Image (tube, grey):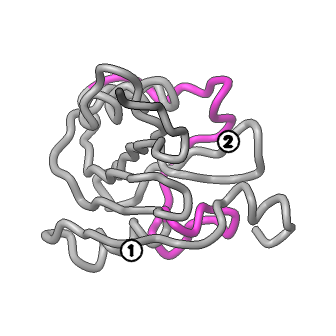
Amino acid sequence: MYTYNSNKMFTIGVFAIILDKDNKVLICHRCDYDLWNLPGGGLEKNETPEMGVIREVKEETGLDVIVKKITGVYAKKDKNEIVFSFLCEVINGEITLNDEADKINYFEINSIPKNFSPKQLERLWDYFNEPNKIHYKLQEGKSSIELIQEGKL
């Protein structure tokens, strides 16, 4: 008989890289923390990663997107998390503020606010530096929330 072990649990994150015609990236400012991040979040039961990122973008931005391609898979073994990064294209909708995001704007990659998730910034740079590559990386270290709580972000 199999015994459930909570130490075996992990989460799957899905995040979107959405670019405008000028190659600026769409990012959201969270309502619960003074933090900017890519639209995305956790995968829900019975969702594929592609379905999850489409849902998350709609919930956080009001935009309908299609997934163009996967840009990276990132393992955060110290957090028991796997994160998928996707290049997405807006096909419909309007940017709409909500209870998750109080600001949503496009930024040039060199003008991303300082209070942006460092791991997500690494994923953005991976894409911008090598857009034709699927990146597979280990990301370690404290989460953005931990860094904020320590006054380091």
* Classed neighbour count for the residue bearing mark 2: other residues with Cα under 10 Å, few (<14), some (14–19), many (≥20): many
In the rendered view, does 58 fall on the left or right side of 104? left
Q: Position of residue 55 (x, y in %)?
A: 37, 25
Look at the image and say whether residue 25 sits in the magenta stretch.
no
Tag 1 and tag 2, C-beta contact below 8 Å: no
Q: Secondary structure at mark 2?
A: strand
In the rendered view, does 24 fall on the left or right side of 106? left
Q: Position of residue 152 (x, y in %)?
A: 80, 72
Does 9 sit above or below residue 21? above
Q: Nearer the viewer, residue 81 or 91?
A: 81
Q: Position of residue 108 (x, y in %)?
A: 46, 66
Q: Nearer the viewer, residue 10 or 140?
A: 10
Which residue is rendered at x = 38% and y = 43% of the image? 14
Does 88 sit above or below residue 109? above
Does 44 sit above or below residue 69? above
* Classed neighbour count for the residue bearing mark 1: other residues with Cα under 10 Å, few (<14), some (14–19), many (≥20): some
Q: Amino acid at mark 2?
A: Arg
Whether residue 57 is visible to the viewer of this picture, yes or no, is: no
Which residue is rendered at x = 47% and y = 63% of the image? 77
| Residue 3 position by quadrant | top left
Labelled disc at residue 125: 1
Residue to which mark 2 is pinned: 30
Q: Position of residue 72 (x, y in %)?
A: 27, 61
User: In which quadrant of the rendered image does the N terminus lie?
Assistant: top left
The magenta stretch spans which residues? 92-120
Tell me the distance, in whole angstroms, between the alpha carbons under discs 1 and 2.
21 Å
Whether residue 128 is visible to the viewer of this picture, yes or no, is: yes
Q: Amino acid at mark 1?
A: Trp
Q: Secondary structure at mark 1?
A: helix
How many marks the image carries: the answer is 2
Which residue is rendered at x = 64% and y = 61% of the image? 143
